Amino acid sequence: MKRPVLYTVPGMVLLTFFSTGSPLAKTPLSGLTLAETGEGTKPSHMTGDGPCKPTPPDALGPFYVPNAPERTRVGNGHILSGVVRTSADCSPIEGARIEFWLAGPDGKYDDDHRAVMFSDKNGAYKFESNFPPPYRGRPSHIHIRITAKGYRTLVTQYYPEKNQTQGRLDLILIPEN
């Protein structure tokens, strides 16, 4: 059984669902695919371990395609930056693989709006894109998937405020047990 979890962050509201069972499940709304926790584990935002609060997971969505090209820009007008950190002690994670995908200005997903980049020696990243348009009732958003050796994979989304040209999102990963 899925249970909704509502997050509020200044300037945005996130709604996601969690359940036990298979790693991915379909929601009844628009065929979204959700990242779920494994059976018998807590969602990452509920662990509370360590001094850094883990980044809440969010929907993978139906438009994820692996093997995006390595690049730091897929358009212009909006810059998203931050630092990839560990929840254990807030230290930066170098070399984390960060995948981005978003709708183009026409509201459609395509290969021109997918990218992969890696966090630098300080865990920092900077990604430039068009401002993601809302579509089919969804707010503006950028999908993000982060992987790093020794850490749980994180799938989340970033929700910029209307007309915002810059945003910051630190990505806090949970160490594997």
Image (cartoon, grey):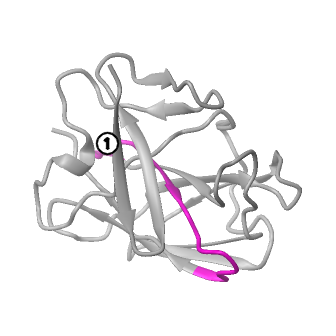
Residue 103: % across, % down: 76, 53
Q: Which residue is mark 1?
A: 152
Toward the viewer: 49 or 107? Answer: 107
Asked whether 146 falls inside the magenta stretch, the response is no
Residues rendered magenta in the picture: 149-166
Q: Residues within 10 Å of mark 1 (few under 14, many from 20)?
A: some
The residue positioned farthest toward the front in the image shown: 137
Residue 28: % across, % down: 56, 24
Residue at screen point 82% across, 45% down: 110
Q: Which quarter of the image is occupied by the N terminus? A: top left
Task: Say whether residue 49 is visible.
Answer: yes
Q: Amino acid at mark 1?
A: Arg
Asked whether 157 falls inside the magenta stretch, the response is yes
Toward the viewer: 44 or 98? Answer: 44
Left or right, 119 with respect to 51, comes to right
Q: Secondary structure at mark 1?
A: loop
Residue 118: % across, % down: 52, 61
Q: Is residue 38 above or below residue 108?
A: above
Task: Say whether residue 124 is visible.
Answer: no
Toward the viewer: 44 or 6? Answer: 6
Q: Main secondary structure of the magenta part?
A: loop
Residue at screen point 32% across, 16% down: 21
Left or right, 89 with respect to 102, comes to left
Left or right, 101 with respect to 43, comes to right
